[in-house]
Image (cartoon, grey):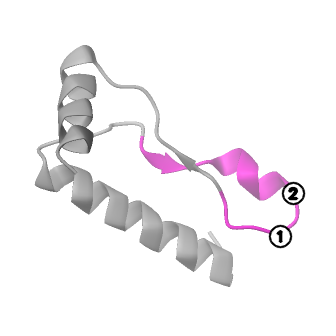
Amino acid sequence: MSDHAYDREAIECLEQLRAALAEHGITLPSLELHLLSYAGNYTTPPLITLGNCNTATADRLADALRKR
């Protein structure tokens, strides 16, 4: 990754999301920056890929979101 401001923003957001999910015992193995987002111009930060998860993880994620 570069040192572009949008890269820093996306990486910080990704780290915050991982930490918030971990507080609820949730790990999304595919959670990462969306590499194809780098194929275009920097008009917005790169996308974040939430990825796939098993049903148990999806259940924990749904429970965590309902508690808000």
Q: Position of residue 58 (x, y in %)?
A: 28, 25
Residue type (three-letter) at the residue carrying disc 1: Thr
As drawn, 30 above or below 4: above
Residue 33 part of the magenta-drawn span: yes
Residue type (three-letter) at the residue carrying disc 2: Gly
Q: Which of marks 2 and 1 is in front?
A: 1
The residue at 32%/38% (across/down) is 28
Residue beneath label 2, please?
40
| Image position of 6 (left or right of 57) | right
Disc 2 from disc 1: Cα separation: 8 Å
Q: Where is residue 50 in the image (x, y as percent from the top left)?
A: 46, 40
Q: What element carries label 1?
A: loop
| Image position of 47 (left or right of 15) | right
Tell me which segment is drawn in magenta.
31-46
The residue at 17%/31% (across/down) is 60
Q: Answer yes or no: do the residues labelled 2 and 1 have beta carbons within 8 Å?
A: yes
Badge 2 crowding class, 10 Å Cα cut-off, few under 14, some 14 to 19, many 20 or more, is few
As drawn, 39 above or below 19: above
Which quadrant holds the N terminus?
bottom right
Residue 29 part of the magenta-drawn span: no
Q: Where is residue 8 in the image (x, y as percent from the top left)?
A: 55, 78
Residue beneath label 1, please?
43
Q: Is mark 2 on a helix, strand or loop?
A: loop
The residue at 24%/61% (across/down) is 19
